[in-house]
Amino acid sequence: MSNEKIPYKIYLEEHEMPTHYYNLRADMEKKPAPLLNPGTGEPLTLEEMEPIFCKELIKQELDNDTKFVPIPQEIRDFYKMYRPSPLVRAYCLEERLGTPAKIYYKFEGNNTSGSHKLNSAIAQAYYAKEQGLKGVTTETGAGQWGTALSMACSYFQLDCDVYMVKVSYEQKPFRREVMRTYGATITPSPSNTTNIGRKILEEHPNTTGSLGCAISEAVEAATSREGYRYVLGSVLNQVLLHQSIIGLETKAAMDKYGIKPDIIIGSAGGGSNLGGLIAPFMGEKLTGKEDYQIIAVEPASCPSFTRGKFAYDFADTGKICPLAKMYTLGSDYIPAPNHAGGLRYHGMSTTLSELYDQGYMEARSVAQTDVFAAAEEFARVEGILPAPESAHAIKVALDEAKKCIETGEEKTILFGLTGTGYFDLTAYQKYHDGEMEDYVPTDEEIAKSLSSLPQID
Amino acid sequence: MSNEKIPYKIYLEEHEMPTHYYNLRADMEKKPAPLLNPGTGEPLTLEEMEPIFCKELIKQELDNDTKFVPIPQEIRDFYKMYRPSPLVRAYCLEERLGTPAKIYYKFEGNNTSGSHKLNSAIAQAYYAKEQGLKGVTTETGAGQWGTALSMACSYFQLDCDVYMVKVSYEQKPFRREVMRTYGATITPSPSNTTNIGRKILEEHPNTTGSLGCAISEAVEAATSREGYRYVLGSVLNQVLLHQSIIGLETKAAMDKYGIKPDIIIGSAGGGSNLGGLIAPFMGEKLTGKEDYQIIAVEPASCPSFTRGKFAYDFADTGKICPLAKMYTLGSDYIPAPNHAGGLRYHGMSTTLSELYDQGYMEARSVAQTDVFAAAEEFARVEGILPAPESAHAIKVALDEAKKCIETGEEKTILFGLTGTGYFDLTAYQKYHDGEMEDYVPTDEEIAKSLSSLPQID
């Protein structure tokens, strides 16, 4: 079909949709370093993880060898409700820019959770249901992951307990309300429902909460009751595995029309979207079949790839989770309060960290006012109002497309548009009102937070 | 293809998308009654309307004869960015209900405006651009239409002045912010920018505004400047014409798989969505080719079809717009303040009113707590969080599907899912908190507002 005119949107047909997840780790010669038990410094075993996580998900987490993992029919049925997501040819944007570049984006926002997070949420809820659990617990900051998990649990009729950082709970009542619509229980964290929550409230009665604290409460809520487990929406290998559906669909759609991207761009927070989008392309790169320029984009205010250190660190601020070897700014690192654009995790997926360290991808950091300017430029031509997180990738895609105007190169640019910004309008308002500031941490600040890294080799 | 398994979602391919709008009026033996000049009581002419409306749109408004109107390429290109919208087979819902019915819905919410309104907004913006105008003005209440028009104007680089009812402007800052992202100017109404606005503010300094007042300001803002016209998102024939894209896509998708709906259900406010969804089906019914049961669903608190009168009435509360013959509750009618579910227009499309009067469709009114219960039931299974407006149709679709459980009939039910509820979460919150009340106007209340109908025959 390669001679046909490429449509504005490529939708795979149902029978063309992926039947297996792709485990990128299987094609990596040097595997990502294992998670370590923070007590012993030894690699975590399935048995050690079982009280916290669902069994099948642990197996996926630890499995560096199985290349293709079948997607259970129940998950595929759910995917059919909102997938395939469209691969969009940005004709209108190209014309407005006057670029010879060909721009494509994979749009993951056409579902009520508003982002790609649902791809992994439904898989995790499925395995929890299969294990016969009553429910799952999790934490949420801005609320994207909590919403996705609520939807997934509602579908499988599982309890869903979400610990939502108190300041978000109060400032984002609409996110909370979406989760309630799907029957989830939302608790502002810290709360009186857990020991750790009560302890924190006693010590800091006026705290507005933190993601680290919410994680601690969610883990306690899972492990202190029969029939519950804790689930997480990014960073983990299992999440990247589920998110490979993004890249697999993208590649299938591109192959159908004989398109080969020169540059692949994704926003990077914990790595769930980037890891998913690039998976099959990176697989070809690792095995020497094809070459692609792959760019991770992160906020200048939380630059783990571009200014962090590749080392073992705590996965959470509360230092109760396993140690992961990753690009990190130190688990004490907290982006400046004026940072509105998401992607605020101090570390990065161990898989992506390993690939970055081996030179298979590059990274760029961008200022948030530039990100919102790119978001607006994109929205006005392509219609979609992007999530600030997604707009990091847009910014670099626009940069690259504009470079092509100068060089005359007809590069094919692919980027991941992970979601919509309908619940991020406070940030847009700040931007419109000229009240948004950029923030770049000093070398001293980063050195300080890195000084707390655990001593492991 | 009729023997194939029907997919979860049917997307037309680009080459299958409609190239013409369908003008239902051309197939009506008895045409809808013309709009009248409120001063003379005579049918409005193109010349009289030209200072207010775009010329080509007036032609479409007055043309009862041209059956197929070509969709200009520029509009078709824009449609390609967010259309075709999916026709979804609600397999998950059917299974959860245990109904033998086959349920389909046409989902119009996959665009940033969040609803079908964009279909007409882009057409109206195009004709304004073609006429060489600088910009357009409009009013918006909840903000769905204003958002759609902002997106459309941004695409064609037209000015977009939106008069937003002050109470919405203050209570829905996010809607406002989306419009600002698309470069629109949003003015809370009443405002100091128009004579009528200043007059109202002088008389009622503390008013929170009304749609009638916002219309008056928008019309003044259009007519008092060179190069501007006023546009409207519902009720008008031209809007139904543009919205026929919904029904045409639906019918093409159904025909492709040999599906014939027994029942077609749409929410009805001013009629833009219902008129668009049913257009080609109604055309077949009018010409005796097929028969369909067609149901309009309206809120019990604003029951123009089910409890209104078919008569000439003012199209706006301010009584400055043309008179239209329609089912109406009287232009003074205002739904109770606790009414959260949209669809609050006192009248109804003249075309749909005529068809209803002739017995081609039926109507039902539903209580808003039932509507939100249906919305939640739907969201938990099908994923999508519906707009309250859309949930009116869901309510009746669920009723009909549940009837089939009793009768064993395998009816094919089609309904229009016009949009998403991401900006309606205050209403959902009220519902979750048990603070939502139903309201049904008394016969006396309706009789009172109907007593102000103009005397025309």
Image (cartoon, coloured by chain):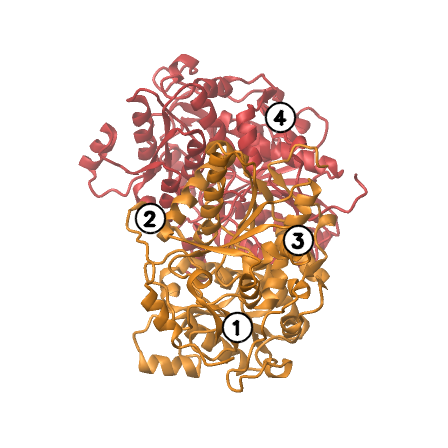
Chain colours: A red, B orange
Upstream in sequence: badge 2 or badge 3: 3
Upstream in sequence: badge 3 or badge 1: 3
Give the quarter of the figure containing the N terminus of chain A: top right
The amino acid at mark 2 is: Tyr
The amino acid at mark 4 is: Thr
Extreme-left residue of the structure = A202
Which of pointers 2 and 3 indicates the residue nearer the eye? 3
Which of pointers 4 and 1 indicates the residue nearer the eye? 1
Report the residue marked by disc 1.
B325
Report the residue marked by disc 3.
B248
Callout 4: SS: loop
Q: Residue at x 36, y 61 (%)?
A: B171
Which of pointers 3 and 1 indicates the residue nearer the eye? 1
The amino acid at mark 1 is: Lys
Report the residue marked by disc 2.
B431
Residue B397 numbered mark, or none: none
